[in-house]
């Protein structure tokens, strides 16, 4: 199954105003998603520069809702409590 993941920062300018702890956690977050990408679980991921506030997104593959929720909860940005996230099942029309 495919899932859409949205990582919600604690403030709209988070990407510009991170403190040292937040920056370290976000580096762990990047490494976490890079690892999933290398395992071919992730189709695309990265920041979205929405003028109302930057957020992160990913489209990934998981066996079921339980695995998708685990992927979300294991993200260091979420596990640390710095960010929140949502994950929704999705139907992919086309992908490269």
Image: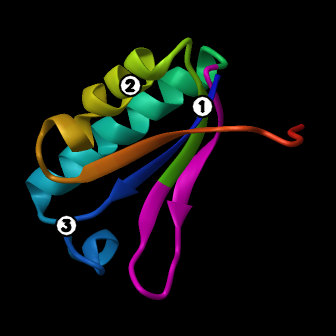
| Residue 86 horizontal/vertical position (percent) | 37, 47
Which residue is the site of mark 3? 10
Check residue 60 in the rendering and tell me which mark sits there, or answer none. 1
Q: CA distance from mark 2 to mark 3?
A: 20 Å
Residue at 27% x, 63% y: name it. Answer: 9
| Residue 22 horizontal/vertical position (percent) | 16, 55
Q: Secondary structure at mark 2?
A: helix
Disc 1 residue crowd, few under 14, some 14–19, many 20+, Cα 10 Å: many
Do residues under tags 1 and 3 come within 8 Å of each other at their CB atoms?
no
Q: CA distance from mark 1 to mark 3?
A: 23 Å
The C terminus lies in which quarter of the figure? top right
- Establish if 15 lies above or below 2: below
Which portion, as a residue range, is magenta?
41-56
Do residues under tags 1 and 2 come within 8 Å of each other at their CB atoms?
yes
Which residue is the site of mark 2? 71
Residue at 39% x, 29% y: name it. Answer: 32
N-terminal label among 1 and 3: 3
């Amino acid at each position: 199954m495919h899932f859409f993941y949205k990582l919600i920062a604690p403030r709209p300018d988070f990407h510009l105003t991170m403190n040292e702890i937040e920056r370290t956690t976000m580096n762990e977050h990047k490494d976490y998603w890079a690892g999933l990408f290398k395992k071919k679980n992730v189709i695309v991921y990265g920041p979205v520069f929405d003028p109302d506030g930057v957020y992160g997104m990913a489209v990934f593959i998981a066996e079921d809702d339980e695995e998708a929720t685990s992927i979300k909860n294991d993200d260091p940005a979420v596990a640390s409590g710095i960010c929140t996230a949502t994950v929704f099942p999705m139907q992919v029309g086309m992908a490269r």
